[in-house]
Image (cartoon, rainbow, N blue to C red):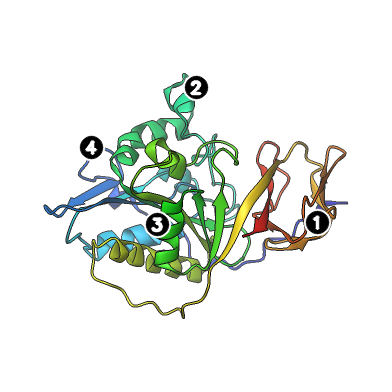
Amino acid sequence: MTDASFAPDTAPLEVLPRDISSYRQGNTGIDYVHRFESGRPGPHVLVNALTHGNEICGMVAATHLLDAGVRPKLGTLTVSFAHVEAYNAFDIERPYDNRQLVHNLNRIWSKAMLDGTEQSPELKRARELRPVLDAADYVLDIHSTRAPVQPFWVYPEFERNAGLALAIGNPLVHLVMPVGGAPGTGVTGYGRHGEPGVDGGAVVVECGQHFSQSAADLATDVTLRFLAHLGLTEPVASTVAKAPARRFRLLQVHMVKTEGFAFARPVLGFETFHKGELIAVDAGEEIRSPCDDCTIFMPTRAALVGREGVYLTVPL
């Protein structure tokens, strides 16, 4: 096996970052965080963009809300640009390299990490954003993928999250994450959102390939439907025909141990494997399918030690 198992990045750069410095001054005392209160009872909804610096579809959705003057008719709407420092590090010659600067901002939301002594740009920003997450009843965290795969929801395995994603509709694929089943603690697992028996909901939407126009369009569409479903804005007509959702439950996450990590065949995501079939190798370890119909999500596009190599799931 060689690096040929990694498909090359050939997606066109249809949507590129733009200067968002004009959004720095919000009204919360936290840079790049904007809050709008209706004065009427209702949920506090957070729309969070740029958890990863090169996932710019969320920037498109967030700036749309602000530029269009979207205001809640009940409850409270908060719009945040999470990792602007990484976003500003974009280099068109290396467009995939500014996902993070040190830490993955979507893995460090545990109490131990946030209350610890370790320092990084991501930890600094997470500590700044902590009260923003604390205040939110509902969280929409907008992401995109390196490979041009179909969009999907990702959320901790609570019925409140499943019900929220199912009610909103498109995307019609769901990745259900057992609590504690993935490395680190993400934005949607922070605080009470990672606990059973509470109200609200917190979901990630993966909108498609980072730089595709379709991902930017979907991010905006999902955001508007999310707000409408929760009653903050007027109903939005969906342009996607209703269809049953396809749900997958995470079984295993394999981290990259060495630069020799390689897949048994070229993959993009959503490939299926039979029980016992070889998926990848790393440091002499064979990664094999634990079941029939094992479907892989988010296979790495480069062997970066310490990052996720592949997610193994089973259909529900």
Asked if residue 189 lies left or right of residue 289, the reply is: left
- Separation (CA) of disc 4 from disc 2: 24 Å
- Separation (CA) of disc 3 from disc 4: 20 Å
- Separation (CA) of disc 1 from disc 4: 47 Å
Say whether disc 3 or disc 4 marks the residue closer to the N-terminus: 4
Q: Residue at x 62, y 60 (%)?
A: 316
Camera-side residue of 129 and 289: 289
Query: Circle 2 — which element?
Result: loop
Residue annotated with mark 3: 59
Residue annotated with mark 2: 118
- In the image, what residue type sits under mark 1? Ser
* Rendering coords of residue 213 (x, y %): 49, 70
Label 4: how many residues lie within 10 Å, few (<14), some (14-19) or many (20+)?
few
- Separation (CA) of disc 3 from disc 1: 32 Å
* Rendering coords of residue 240 (x, y %): 45, 78
- In the image, what residue type sits under mark 3? Met
Can residue 17 be seen from the camera position used here?
A: no
| CB atoms of marks 3 and 2 within 8 Å | no
Camera-side residue of 50 and 74: 74
- In the image, what residue type sits under mark 2? Glu
Q: Residue at x 22, y 48 (%)?
A: 35
